[in-house]
Image: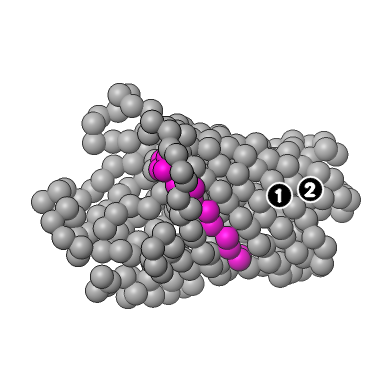
Amino acid sequence: MKNRLWTLALMTALLVGAAGAAYAVPSLGGPSGIVALPNTEIAGTMDMSTAAGYQAFETTGPAGPDDAVSWSLQVLRGVSAEAELWAAYSRTHDGADTDLWRLGGKYRVEGLLPADVQLAVGGSIGRWVDGFGLPWVTSMDMYSTSSGVSDVDVKSLYAVASRELTPVASGWESGPRGTRVVANAGMMYISVDPDAGGNEASARPFVGLEITQGDSVIGLEYRMKDNDLDEKAVFSAVLRRPGGQNFYWEIGTTNASPIGLGLSDQDFFARFCFDLPMETGYY
């Protein structure tokens, strides 16, 4: 808890006084989102959003705490005003290398909720090569009797709603120093199915908050713990800043594993994000 409080205090200090638009940013998991969880943003059709990042995390294996690192790449593009498609790859090193590939999409649903509330649904499929037995899943019952290696199918489904908490009169559209606050709430389903058998699944609610001040964004997210799959509830915080035309960087902390499960400790991540202009867009 102390680590989380220090994180919030540091990011708030960095945000105050920053020089506004919302970013449709690939999350660590792939879809546009905050850190590891999605929001209702849809990527633009005239460019391709990419993100390359580094994530450190500590896991708890049979021999005790173990450090690991993950390098990741996400590519995201809108295919219409209401839909986006994405691909994500990560390579994790923890004594041995393992690869995770994921593909997914998101669709923003219109007309089901009040006009000031956005709703989006989405999902993904993925293949985790040689993932079985890695420390971040050894706490799960299905891995407790074997340390073998197996490929793992990872699937997710989600629905998320968002609402802007700051009215236009707050100054968001009147100048660069306006503040925008958007709240998210949703439900996330994760299924983990190793080739060796023993499928497990989780469905848990989550919430998020995005605060934009000028060109800076602070994002916070929380997903409730699943006692069978998570070591702790997922919590993430991020600071995002532009670094030039079509370029921005972000730093933050999360305890989400590369497949989205909650680990025991918060650790650092950093990413560099680029919007690559495309010659044509979809209309």
Q: Residue at x 67, y 55 (%)?
A: 90
Within 10 Å of disc 2 (Cα), the crowding (few <14, some 14-19, many 20+) is some
Task: Please state which of residues 230 and 98 is positioned toward the viewer in this rendering.
Answer: 98
Determine the secondary structure under disc 2: strand
Q: Main secondary structure of the magenta part?
A: strand
Separation of marks 2 and 1 at Cα, in angstroms: 6 Å
Q: Residue at point 26% right, 64% down?
A: 214
Q: How many numbered dots are placed on residues in this image?
A: 2
Residue stretch rendered in magenta on the structure: 42-55
Between residue 139 and residue 129, name the one nearer to us: 129
* Marks 2 and 1 close (CB-CB < 8 Å): yes
- Report the residue marked by disc 1: 100
Q: Is there any visible trace of residue 169 in the rendered image? A: yes
- Mark on residue 129? 2
Mark 2 or 1 closer to N-term? 1
Q: Is residue 70 above or below residue 101?
A: below
Q: List x then y, in percent, for residue 164.
A: 26, 46
Kindly give the residue lying farthest to the top in the view shown.
111
Q: Position of residue 93 (x, y in %)?
A: 75, 64
Q: Amino acid under label 2?
A: Val
Left or right: 174, with 44 as reference point: left
Where disc 1 sits, the SS reads: strand
Residue 158 seen in the current view? no
Asked if residue 21 lies left or right of residue 79, the reply is: left
Q: What residue is at 42 percent from the left and 43 percent from the top? A: 46
Front one among 251 and 245: 245
Percent across and percent down for residue 37 are 49, 48
Q: How is the image coloured?
A: one colour
> Residue 155 appears in which quarter of the rendering?
top right
* Quadrant of residue 115 within the rendered picture: top left
Identify residue type, mark 1.
Leu
Residue farthest along the left direction in this orientation: 169
